[in-house]
Amino acid sequence: MIFDEKELINGCRARDRTAQKRLYDVFGGKMYAISMRYTKNRDDAQDVLQDAFIKIYEHIHSFRGDSPLEFWIRSIVVNTALKHLKKQKNLVDLDEAHQTKYDIETPDQSLAGFQWQQLMEFIHELPTGCQTVFNLFAIEGYKHHEIAEMLNISEGTSKSQFARARTLLQQKLNKEHRFDNESIKRQS
């Protein structure tokens, strides 16, 4: 979608409803996908998206332009999703008791044959704490010390939750791969 970023920002700063709608049209789909990665259902994702865009419209004047607009919007959506999870007390499993060492004992399962949507479903099945840390680290690219600060946890807890998420995803991939192989063998 082609748009003039400066014109869009200036329109939103002037509270022009057409510019605000255009901003939503340009970024809403991607930001909804991000919301879905942090929530467990569509209603919560819609709530996060709506809250995030309200914040975006209210604070667009603080956008300095030192990064692409999409990155700024993405950070607001991620932070809004995290606040939503905290408010719903879905991050309860992120405590020091989960600092058990999780190692993947089997070699990494190839992702060939798994579609993005199927992988996202696997991520949604993770416990909320693991899902959140996995999204922040593996998908959003935050460092563990940044995640620790964002979630008010220790860096060790962030690393532990990520390792736990990887282990659980690996187990799910291995299980699904076995079923795929068994169904292929039965069809032969």
Image: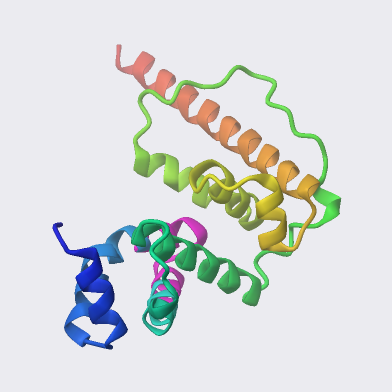
Query: Is 134 situated left or right of 43 in this image?
Result: right
Tell me: residue 40, above or below residue 105. Answer: below
Magenta-colored stretch includes residue 42: yes
- Residue 145: image location, x then y, percent: 71, 49
Res 116 → quadrant: top left
Q: Position of residue 165 (x, y in %)?
A: 63, 41
Quarter of the rendering occupied by the C terminus: top left
Q: Is residue 67 left or right of residue 139?
A: left
The answer to which quarter of the image holds residue 114 is top left
| Quadrant of the snapshot with the N terminus | bottom left
Coloring scheme of the render?
rainbow
Relative vertical location of residue 23 with respect to residue 130 in this rendering, above or below: below
Using residue 155 as the reference point, say whether residue 40 is left or right of it: left
Query: Which stretch did the figure color magenta?
Result: 32-48
Main secondary structure of the magenta stretch: helix
Question: Where 62 sits versus 64, above or below?
Answer: below
In this view, 166 is above or below 89: above
At horizontal 57% and vertical 36% (from top left) the residue drawn is: 169
Closest to the observer, 83 or 93: 83
Along the viewing direction, whichever of 106 and 73 lies nearer the viewer = 73
Going 49% across and 22% down the picture, which residue do you hit?
A: 178
Q: For this view, does 171 lie left or right of residue 117?
A: right
Residue furthest toward the right? 97
Q: Position of residue 26 (x, y in %)?
A: 23, 64
Q: Which is more toward the observer, 109 or 83?
A: 83
Determine the residue located farthest toward the top in the rendered image.
188
Expressed as whole percent of the image width and height from the top left, the position of residue 86 reads: 65, 71
